[in-house]
Amino acid sequence: MSKVATIEIEGKKYEFPVVVGTENELAIDIKQLRGQSGAITLDPGYKNTGACESAITFLDGEKGILRYRGYSIEELAEKADFLEVCYLLIFGELPSKSQLQKFNTDILDQSIVNEDMKTVLNGFPESAHPMGVLSSLTSALTAFNPKSVNVESEEDMYRAIVKILAKFPVLAAWTLRRKNNQTLYNKDTNIGYVESLLKMMFQKEGKNYKQNKTVVNALDKLLILHADHEQNCSTSTVRIVGSSHAGLFASISAGVSALWGPLHGGANQAVIEMLEEIKADGGDTSKFIAKAKDKEDPFRLMGFGHRVYKNFDPRAKIIKKAADEVLGQLGVEDPILEIAKGLEKAALEDQYFVERKLYPNVDFYSGIIYRAMGIPTEMFTVMFAVGRLPGWIAQWREMRMRKEPIGRPRQVYIGETHRKFKDIENR
Ligand code: SDX
């Protein structure tokens, strides 16, 4: 028997169908609400509002569950590699050997970035934040690949998808090279996706680049953990920009800008800056816990809290464990790892955080591993973007394949009612 929800407004009752997801989540389908009742819903931050139906990623915030296309994040982080997860998120199934081989070859065939893109890059000062540069370069890709804008067929979409998967890591690496005023390299097509990213980032002029297996494996795992997270701020941005048919690269560029914010992906940089501040201040975490609780103080415990997870972020658990392993394997002693653990312990014993169900999120420990790999703090969110790219692509493709309407929310107007124009003499 199909479920319905009844809403009563000014004594009149309206019935709306209830949608039940495959994980038994309920949603009231209000497509006809305004037509039937004249009323709309109001939900700043969309805390209670579903923007779409999606088959890509499932989160259970209460139980701390995260699955990509039904596979648990724990299994994927342990058993898959990043390119397999890209394929899984975008096309819905883990690839066979031959499918993965073709996917990889198609990506490698598109790895060259137009030389003129370097002119765009070199227009930025070395002081520019890499996320601003990456967003601009990603949008600029459209100018050099105009056929990737109006993609109606699945084949056109596939061509645009392999292009951005191929070129985005090159652009990401170039943002670091620009900051250090170093030579820009294109992708080495004889090595893996993660290996070539690291080589483009850290290759020293005239020297052989030696891969560090620990770093490659750790980065591959981090990219998997960041690959998708259903309708988060930057993914919702990609979907709504994509809904105007602005093209995949423009949509991804908008997603990069949304991810940059310190309340979202920019938190991984803000966490390290916060931990450094605590260290410089003598390591007294209680002072910063008090600041985070003080409503008069804008300071927040960066890397803590989450819109959906009201339990441990499963990614944070995996990254915390990996941090110990990677720093051990690299022989790196980083005092801020101990400060982070002390801060986490203190917060999880404090009623303010317990009552609000504020736990460490994906950003709390990730920066410690990036730092141990020699990645500069300002590049942490760029690494998040490289990881999130397949998720953004998958969500954009799903939105386009389902031919979803252009996103255009309503509002409740609270401004002045109609009034006559006043000549300047009378104001
Ligand atoms: C990501 O959505 C995703 O899936 C995002 C992400 C992904 O993979 O895409 O998981 C990646 O963005 C992780 C989040 C990274 N951001 C941070 O670590 C920044 C610090 N965290 C907060 O700013 C906050 O927790 C948010 C932004 C993450 C969530 O904010 P919400 O859901 O809007 O919650 P809220 O601001 O309404 O907070 C509820 C209460 C408030 O207190 P009261 O008004 O009830 O008294 O909790 C407090 C907040 O003040 N609170 C915090 C806090 N986070 C929430 N207090 C201190 N420190 C914090 N970090």
Image: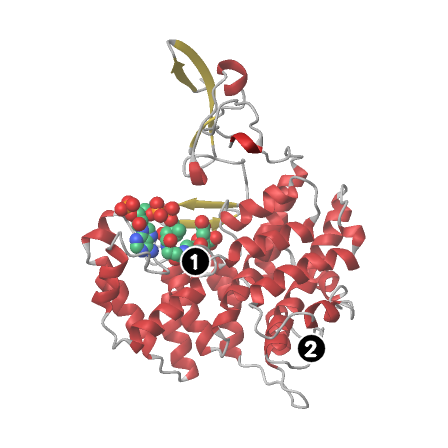
Q: Nearer the viewer, residue 364 or 315?
A: 364
Q: Secondary structure at mark 2?
A: loop
Q: Is 136 drawn above or below residue 411 in the view shown?
A: below
Q: Please tell me how crowded label 1 is: few (under 14), some (14-19), or many (20+) other residues with Cα within 10 Å.
A: some
The part of the image, by quadrant, that contains residue 187 is: bottom right
The part of the image, by quadrant, that contains residue 136 is: bottom right
Q: Tag 2: residue type?
A: Leu
Instruction: State the separation of the CA atoms marked 2 and 1.
Output: 36 Å
- Name the residue carrying label 1: 74
Q: Is residue 308 visible?
A: no
Q: Residue at x 77, y 48 (%)?
A: 156
Q: Secondary structure at mark 1?
A: helix
Residue 184 - label: 2
> In the drawing, does residue 298 fall left or right of residue 187?
left
> In the drawing, does residue 219 fall left or right of residue 48?
right
Q: Nearer the viewer, residue 277 or 208?
A: 277
Q: Considering only order in the chain, which callout, 1 or 2, is on the residue closer to the N terminus?
A: 1
Q: Is residue 404 visible?
A: yes
> In the drawing, does residue 154 fall left or right of residue 11?
right
The answer to whether the residues at label 2 and label 1 have Cβ atoms under 8 Å apart is: no
Q: Tag 1: residue type?
A: Glu
